[in-house]
Image (cartoon, grey):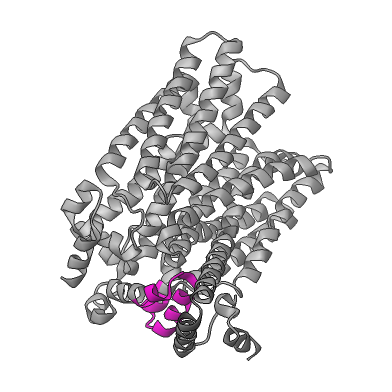
Amino acid sequence: MGMEGIQENGNGEMGLSDFPLGRKNKYKRMDSEFTDYDDDDPSHHHHQLERRKKSTRKYVFGCAVFASLNNVLLGYDVGVMSGAILFIQEDLKITEVQQEVLVGVLSIISLLGSLAGGRTSDAIGRKWTMGLAAVVFQTGAAVMTIAPSFEILMVGRILCGVGIGFGVMIAPVYIAEISPTIARGSLTSFPEIFINLGILLGYVSNYAFSGLSAHISWRVMLAVGILPSVFIGVALFIIPESPRWLVLQNRVEEARSVLMKTNENEWEVEERLAEIQLAAGTTNTDKYEEKPVWRELLSPSPALRRMLITGIGIQCFQQITGIDATVYYSPAIFKAAGIEDESKLLAATVAVGVSKTAFILIAIILIDKVGRKPLLYVSTIGMTTCLFGVGITLILMKEGSISIALAILFVCGNVAFFSVGIGPVCWVLTSEIFPLRVRAQASGLGAVGNRMCSGLIAMSFLSVSHAITVGGTFLIFSAISALSVAFVYKYVPETKGKSLEQIELLFQDEYGRQGGEVQLGDVEHLVQK
């Protein structure tokens, strides 16, 4: 009751708990309060609206941060395992094959987690899927921390993989569904930043605990990974459920309450709610009950097929251009260029990590201003050039200071261009282009494509580079990256400034899609149809 009292006083539009039903009348009272101020004192009305805007922004920002915490776990795992595996090998005396299985199994299992995550989030909601992901990961990390043998370690690793698969798939979907149109791109990029933050924390953890004995150090490194999960547990009692999922469950009043908290203008709420209900097909429920989502994805309509090509294609291109190989094996690349000193190798590798993280911030600032497609063009063309540069440097140039400088420049350039565009934008696109009914499961398929390509590249890079040299491998990556430019041109529409429901219409209107733009008038016409 205390919480309701706060909201009556006008400070609580952004109260951080899940809301009870039937809040509609309260907002009507707030409307009438605003009207009174308008008559007496227009500046007071303006002040109230400004306060509402600020608190709305803070609230949505907080939700996006909390939802992205699962991605810290994925990044941390990637970063920490590079160091922990050395101590695990020393302590448990595992073979090289067991090491590869231990590291590689995460990609395969997280793929299964992402597949299951779509159905789970449709059943229990986006918010509680994030909670489930954290619990499963925590359990896995705890099992790994106390593992006395390789077999028990694998059980923990598999649980971690399932948790990560759930978390990686659901965070962008949740953020896209809760964000206002104007800021959706930058907020949906948060998970990508948090992955990089996790990788950085993993490296720091390796460094910090490497002085402990082999038996203790790797256990402490893995145990630290449990900490973000605790924050996720707390976050679940703060963030609301996705309004789009609530509409799918016919909990329209609750959806309205959440939209009141996440839209700066109250007058937009009813318009947005009507769009969501139309997209959810609540007016024609029977039609969709006949056809389960998985069947719709297996035999898609022409519009849905175009969405699947765009969504899964961009996720695969994100990985097959070799970003994981560049990050995991940058020491091997610099060694091939002629750096021999161990500390210089690590310093060059840190430069790669810093470039990758810093340039994501540029993407977040620009994604809602210049749009998704221009960033993808800059990113894919830049990556093609840098990958070609790495290949040519390693093949043609003699080892020496110039080839070392060029190799570092091109590798850092490649990860920077990746972070400016295809890195964050591919997650933004897959979370916003699919229709509401199939969004979670279709985004799950996109994440599966991403993890499969990631595993394929990570596991094959060393053997391919032995066969055709590291330089030759990078020339292949460069050719694939050139294909991604053509893919963006042909299949990716511009989604900046459009609501999720309007984006769905872009794909239904083939002509509008080719032009990459649909005017709002066209959208209204299509909605009426």
Q: Which corner quadrant of the image does residue 302 belong to?
A: bottom left
Q: Quadrant of the C terminus?
A: bottom left
Residue 336 x %, y %: 57, 18
Q: Main secondary structure of the magenta part?
A: helix
Taking depth in this image into account, of 99 and 326 the one nearest to the observer is 326
The magenta stretch is 244-270
Using residue 452 as the reference point, say whether residue 529 is left or right of it.
left
Residue 23 or 303: which is nearer the viewer?
23
Q: Position of residue 398 (x, y in %)?
A: 54, 8
- Residue 30: x and y, percent? 49, 84
Residue visible at 27% across and 76% down in the picture = 281
168 vs 381, left or right, is right
Q: Is residue 3 left or right of residue 389?
A: right
Is 262 one of the magenta-colored residues?
yes
- Return the x and y of residue 408 as percentages of the image width and height: 57, 23
Q: Residue furthest top?
A: 398
Q: Residue at x 79, y 40 (%)?
A: 210
Which residue is located at x 45 percent, y 64 percent? 179
Relative to residue 147, is residue 270 drawn left or right?
A: left
Q: How many marks?
A: 0
Give the residue at the far front of this rendering.
40
Placement of 257 over or under 512, stated as above or below: below
Residue 200, magenta (yes or no) = no
Indicate the quadrant where residue 159 lies: bottom right
Image vertical order of residue 95 relative to residue 62, above or below = above
**In which quarter of the view is residue 502 placed?**
bottom left
Work out whether residue 283 can be spotted: yes
Say if 324 sits above or below 338 in the image.
below
* The N terminus - image quarter: bottom right
Q: Is residue 88 at least partly visible in the picture?
A: no
Q: Residue drawn at (54%, 20%), measured in percent from left and top?
A: 407
